[in-house]
Image (cartoon, grey):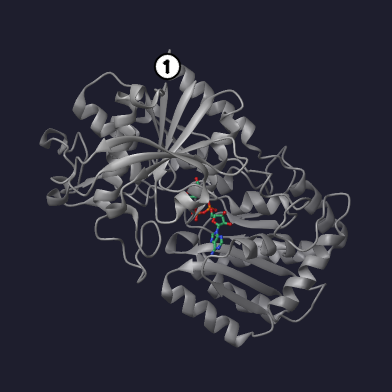
Amino acid sequence: MKILFVASEVYPLVKTGGLADVVGALPVALSATNDVKVLLPAYEGLMGMLSDCRAGPILGNPFGYGEMRLVFGRLEGGSIEFWLLDCPNLFHRQGGPYLNEDGHDHADNHRRFAALSWAGAVVTQYGSLMNWRPDIVHAHDWQTGLLPAYLRAWSQRHPPVVYTIHNMQFTGAYTHDQYLETGLPESLFNMYGLEYYGRYSMLKAGIQYSDAVTTVSPTYAKEIQTPAYGCGLDALMRDQKHKISGILNGVDYQVWNPATDELIDHHYCLRDMDGKALNKQALQKKLGLRIEPRKPLLGLISRLSEQKGLDLVLQVLPDYLEQGAQLILLGSGEKSLESAFRALSGRFPDQVSANFGYNEPLAHQIQSASDFLLVPSRFEPCGLTQLYALKYGTLPIVRRTGGLADSVWEDISGRPQTGFVFNDATVHELWHALQRAMGAYENERVFRQLREQAMQQDFSWESSAAQYTSLYKRLIT
Ligand code: ADP
Ligand code: GLC
């Protein structure tokens, strides 16, 4: 099958969260038996990261922001061909893919990602221009939601579109005036189309006009059909239930494996765990924490946002810090959470290390050094850090929601315990989960056994890729 992925981030080219990890790894897993291309914006500097770049076709200037063209290239030694959508007026920016340097959305995100969606739709129609016509289009998150809307508006024959929701919270909602810039017809702007509480939502468009909707865990697929998790779209999700499924994300064990990880100081594996203890000591030293081989070290690697339940951590943790536990946080996002963690580290200077900004090596080092990883999310479509933690023998402490519920076990009959799981997003429940975790840490034999059970879990991409492949096949035939 020829599969076109369309997304706004791809590891290692551009990453703000788990979406990039997924779009970096799933095409590689699928490419064992398929021909996969990945279309993404040519953000500033991206072309320089690819080898072997060659100019593709010019797509035109439909929005009046400058000519758009495709550029093809690969990562050195990589198996996947990337198709970069080049349009400097839209994609050459200071800041990140969505936010400017002050942390605000780029003012023209509605245009930038309409353009990406439009380009994906165009590729399905003019495959002869690049000698390649997809059998399936797989679009991701709100940034590509208008892709199937363009196809609907043009009402031409086109390959089936699979639309994956990585996070319902980002609805990509804009005003009617902004809609007029997309070139889409007024006939779609109604409640049975992409209208969303008086505005339009790119996410809703993706749900309405695609042939199948997937989300990144079976539990989240059910949750988003309820008012508590549906972000105002739960009625639509219930209505479209027949085309929704949940496929759990996998892990790229080439990137996340303590036996080979080039970003950590000491390698280790199930049979030889010495490296993990050395990593703990090395990171405590590097970050100015007290060197304490026998005190529990908690890791936390997260966007700092309300989704992630970090306010609970701030309330619960002091009790455990007073008993000698340590915390290493790596995060970026809301300034108020940043200052709260900074204050916590001021209060416990040799027990709490608060690190802000985006730091890929440090993320790996925290996984490799910590005894536990905290993921107390209010909602979590899949979550990847807990999957990485399992492989690194770092026991996840998670809330039973979304992909966390589908990947970490405690007290589930027939499943070996691999972490600590609490039900409600309350201080009380998190406190008790930590209590159980600390209890296990005290008992060397129990702790060793849990660690082994965690490290034996296999969340490699093959099984998820097989589920996507059978979905694609069902849609084609
Ligand atoms: P989400 O996509 O909601 O942010 P995930 O758990 O799916 O959550 O994925 C988060 C990804 O981003 C993981 O690869 C994690 O290691 C990484 N990550 C999160 N925050 C940072 C950070 N500040 N620096 C480096 N990597 C980070
Ligand atoms: C989103 C979700 C996260 C998921 C990731 C990749 O950012 O918040 O739970 O793991 O996408 O699918």
Please state which of residues 396 and 266 is positioned toward the viewer in this rendering: 266
Residue 52, horizontal then vertical, whole percent: 52, 41
- Dot 1 surroundings within 10 Å: few (below 14), some, or many (20 or more)? few
Residue at 69 percent of width and 47 percent of height: 411
Q: In which quarter of the view is residue 325 placed?
A: bottom right
Q: Which amino acid does label 1 sit on?
A: Ile
Q: Where is residue 158 in the image (x, y as percent from the top left)?
A: 31, 21
Image coordinates for residue 334, horizontal then vertical, percent: 42, 70
Q: Can residue 370 be seen in this view?
A: yes
The residue positioned 67% from the left and 75% from the top of the image is 320
In percent of width and height, residue 196 lies at 21, 45
Residue 8 vs residue 290, the one in the foreground: 8
Q: On screen, 444 above or below 215?
A: below
Front residue (pair 178, 225): 178
The residue closer to the viewer here, 84 or 327, is 84
Q: Secondary structure under badge 1?
A: helix
Residue labelled with disc 1: 476
Q: How many marks?
A: 1
